[in-house]
């Protein structure tokens, strides 16, 4: 049922955009004809006057009004684009058993939430993962509007929907609505612009793949030749590691800084650092005790602090990436959590319900390199590593339960090595083959093969560095 | 948090003396517009050239350094017609500079002032990365530069009224020199009429249209799509039945495919500057056309 509703919604929105597109184009062509006519007239009159006079002939405000906005979007207003992302996965281990050992699930195991969100490689076999619909346009001379929704069976998830003002005060960029938090590099990218078929493990474990915020963000770009950007954001903080709460004001706040520049014509870099704090009033997760009994635990009054650093370096010979280029990126995140943990709320285990102070310190990182060795072809290598770190829990200290009664939070160092090769038929279509050896589970190694295509329909995308 | 606010305040304070600078700061997307700004503004404008002649202007990354330069620009001069669509919008969105947003006097898209060629009847990506507004490489026809020069001079006088007389005077001088040069170039290039030219991309269309050259085919199968081995083989057999006089390689094109074709067909390959700085001789806009015509004549043996 919900599938039908979704299908018809999608069909409707597509047919709508298609007709809108056709109308836009015929209007555009008509407009272009008129403009050419005007220009011809101007040329004719211009050729008979001498150059000094013709400077007066063309007043400075003759920029055709319609074309003023054109180059920032495309032929269509609003700019509409649809990303299709389909995968075939061959997974040695059952994705329903996927877990990042030593870490509280960030929401949705691969098998449960599926669709590439949350942790895990996704489902086995052929899969139409998320299709991504983006609509953006200038709202008026002051605001830009941006909307991206992820469409998958039975769900439409609004990933980003915000308005943005650029330059109300020199260097200031203000954003409000729902947006991907600027705490990390990959976090601000939509899945279609990842260089691998899935997100880094640390991203999955710490930010549930993409940390979105409902709130406001301010960025300030310094007036220097070196790129220096300082930013602050705050908002609802409803997503992992925070939780929904019935409260006025902010439930999450973050500060971030970016610094970047070029070294010669061929090298450019960007360094970023961030810090974010949020709280969770009720954050549940499923675990097992040492006897294998399924239990449910709830964190409350939890304060979660995350800090991160990231680094991106790109090599493009003479600044031109079209033939060969290389990109290196690495990110590190650390997290500290303090609060209360209610163990086994249903009293299903022999030890029964326990409560007490909980604190943990964890971290993780990844590094990856992607090498375009000839036009259209790229190869990439990525290494992921997490450290479950330290955990202190009062009922364990007092001996009421043992360390093994939190099976999922046992000590572990999840690791993953990924290689990929991709081929782009044009700027708008990419085919990728990826192999990963995933040691996120406690004792088992999962060999994962993913074949994927990502194509873009509609407006020409513009990507961040 | 308090420290952060302090940092922002200090940074803002630093911003003030910078914005009080008298010189117009211009951000030129491509070398040809940097050169035109130099002609019109001379030492009264500080010009930042965002791309080098060795870069395909369509495939530039929105690098942090470009955002930093965009942040302080009073005027952005680009080709437009979607040439910079993959990066300019990101710079405009990220730089926090209201002066250069679309619709503002500081936003100048050169191709919008001239008649564009290759405007597609319909836009479909099966035709490759076609630009719905037409071919954006307008600077290779110097008559376009005259029109754009006038418009840009006007824009400069609007942005920087104090130096209006200078821009007007410099533009008059530029226009006089340009119109004399155009006559000379047209005379010199008379022998090139009907020259059958193979280019990599249709970036030579304005040059061809001006000088009466015949752009017979392109090395890339569709705009923005690099040639495959199969396509090159097709080209080779096509060139045997419909020969061309010269294969032109713009400074930013990769040399392999043109050289390969030239070796197998015996058609001479010529490297053209495409823009200012593309060759040693193309030092400014005048050198660009001097050198382009020179090289074509030498390669075609029609000097």
Image (spheres, rainbow, N blue to C red):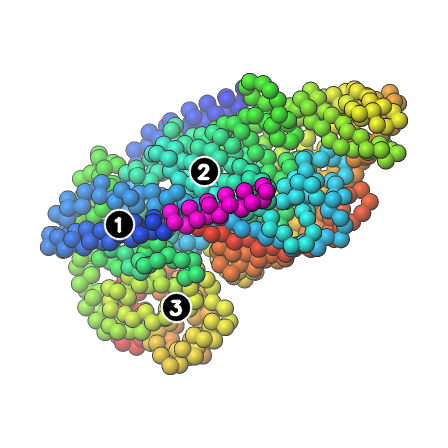
Q: Is residue B272 visible?
A: yes
Local crowd size for mark 2, using a 10 Å CA cut-off: few (<14), some (14–19), many (≥20):
many
Majority SS type along the magenta span: helix
Q: What residue did someone put label 1 on?
A: A31
In this rendering, is residue A341 above or below B224?
Answer: above
Q: Would you say A141 lies left or right of A214 here? A: left
Give the alpha-carbon distance from disc 3 to disc 2, as whole Å.
37 Å
Q: What residue did someone put label 2 on?
A: A146
Query: Helix or strand or loop: what does disc 1 sit on?
Result: helix
The residue range painted magenta reads A1-21
Query: Helix or strand or loop: what does disc 2 sit on?
Result: strand
Question: At which x and y percent is residue B132?
Answer: 35, 54
Q: Is residue A372 visible?
A: no
- Residue at 72% across, 24% down: A299
- Residue at 34% across, 72% down: B216
Q: Would you say A384 lies left or right of B299 here? A: right
Chain for numbered disc 1: A
């Amino acid at each position: 049922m919900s599938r039908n509703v979704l299908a018809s919604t999608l069909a409707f929105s597509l047919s709508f955009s298609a007709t809108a597109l056709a109308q836009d184009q015929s209007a555009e062509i008509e407009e272009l004809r008129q403009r050419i006519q005007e220009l011809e007239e101007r040329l004719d009159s211009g050729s008979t006057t001498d150059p000094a006079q013709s400077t007066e002939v063309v007043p400075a405000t003759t920029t055709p009004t319609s074309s003023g906005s054109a180059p920032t979007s495309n032929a269509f207003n609003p700019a509409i684009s649809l990303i299709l992302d389909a995968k075939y996965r061959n997974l040695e281990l059952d994705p329903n058993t996927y877990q990042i050992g030593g870490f509280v699930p960030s929401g949705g195991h691969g098998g449960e939430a599926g669709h590439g969100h949350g942790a895990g490689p996704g489902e086995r076999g052929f899969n139409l993962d998320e299709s991504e619909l983006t609509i953006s346009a200038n709202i008026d001379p002051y605001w830009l509007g941006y909307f991206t929704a992820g469409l998958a069976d039975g769900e439409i998830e609004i990933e980003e929907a915000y308005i943005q003002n650029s330059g109300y005060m020199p260097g200031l960029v203000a954003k409000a609505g729902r947006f991907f938090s600027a705490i990390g590099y990959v976090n601000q990218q939509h899945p279609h612009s990842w260089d691998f078929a899935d997100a880094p493990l640390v991203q999955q474990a710490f930010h549930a793949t993409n940390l979105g915020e409902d709130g406001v963000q301010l960025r300030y770009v310094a007036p220097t030749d070196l790129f220096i950007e300082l930013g602050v954001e705050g908002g609802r903080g409803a997503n992992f590691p925070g939780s929904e709460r019935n409260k006025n004001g902010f439930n999450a706040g973050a500060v971030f800084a970016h610094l970047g520049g070029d070294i010669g014509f061929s090298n450019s870099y960007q360094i970023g650092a961030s810090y974010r704090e949020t709280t969770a009033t009720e954050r549940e997760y499923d675990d097992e005790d040492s006897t294998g009994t399924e239990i449910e635990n709830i964190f409350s009054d939890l304060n979660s602090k995350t800090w991160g650093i990231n680094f991106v370096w790109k090599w493009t010979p003479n600044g031109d990436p079209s033939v060969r280029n290389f990109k290196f990126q690495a990110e590190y995140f650390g997290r500290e959590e303090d609060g209360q943990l209610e163990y086994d709320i249903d009293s299903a285990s022999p030890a029964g319900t326990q409560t007490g102070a909980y604190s943990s310190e964890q971290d993780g990182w990844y590094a990856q390199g992607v090498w375009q060795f000839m036009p259209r072809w790229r190869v990439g290598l990525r290494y992921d590593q997490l450290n479950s770190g330290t955990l202190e829990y009062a009922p364990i200290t007092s001996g009421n339960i043992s360390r093994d009664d939190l099976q999922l939070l046992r000590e572990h160092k999840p690791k993953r090595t990924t290689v990929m090769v991709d081929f782009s038929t044009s700027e708008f279509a990419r085919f990728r083959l990826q192999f990963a050896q995933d040691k996120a589970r406690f004792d088992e190694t999962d060999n994962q093969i993913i074949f994927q295509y990502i194509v873009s329909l509609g407006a020409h995308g513009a990507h961040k560095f | 948090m308090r420290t952060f606010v302090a940092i922002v305040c200090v940074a803002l304070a630093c911003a003030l003396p910078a914005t009080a600078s008298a010189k117009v700061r211009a951000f030129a997307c491509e070398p040809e517009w940097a050169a035109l700004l130099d002609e019109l503004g001379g030492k009264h404008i500080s010009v930042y050239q965002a791309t080098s002649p060795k870069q395909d202007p369509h495939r530039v990354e929105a690098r942090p350094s470009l955002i930093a330069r965009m942040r302080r620009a009073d005027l952005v001069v680009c080709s437009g017609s979607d040439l910079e669509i993959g990066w300019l919008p990101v710079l405009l969105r990220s730089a926090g500079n209201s002066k250069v947003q679309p619709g503002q006097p500081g936003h100048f898209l050169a191709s919008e002032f001239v008649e564009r060629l290759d405007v597609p009847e319909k836009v479909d990506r099966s035709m490759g990365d076609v630009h719905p507004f037409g071919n954006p490489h307008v600077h290779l026809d110097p008559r376009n530069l005259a029109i754009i020069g006038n418009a840009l001079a006007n824009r400069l006088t609007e942005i920087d009224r104090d130096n209006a007389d200078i821009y007007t005077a410099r533009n008059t001088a530029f226009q006089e020199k340009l119109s004399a040069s155009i006559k000379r170039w047209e005379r010199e290039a008379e022998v090139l009429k009907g020259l059958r030219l193979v280019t990599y991309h249709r970036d030579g269309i304005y040059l061809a249209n001006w000088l009466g050259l015949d752009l017979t085919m392109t090395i890339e199968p569709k705009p923005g799509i690099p040639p495959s081995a199969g396509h090159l083989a097709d080209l080779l057999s096509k060139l045997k039945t419909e020969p061309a006089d010269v294969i032109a390689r713009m400074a930013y094109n990769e040399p392999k495919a043109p050289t390969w074709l030239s070796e197998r067909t015996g058609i001479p390959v010529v490297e053209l500057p495409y823009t200012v700085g593309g060759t040693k001789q193309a030092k400014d806009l005048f050198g660009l056309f001097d050198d382009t015509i020179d090289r074509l004549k030498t390669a075609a043996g029609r000097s």
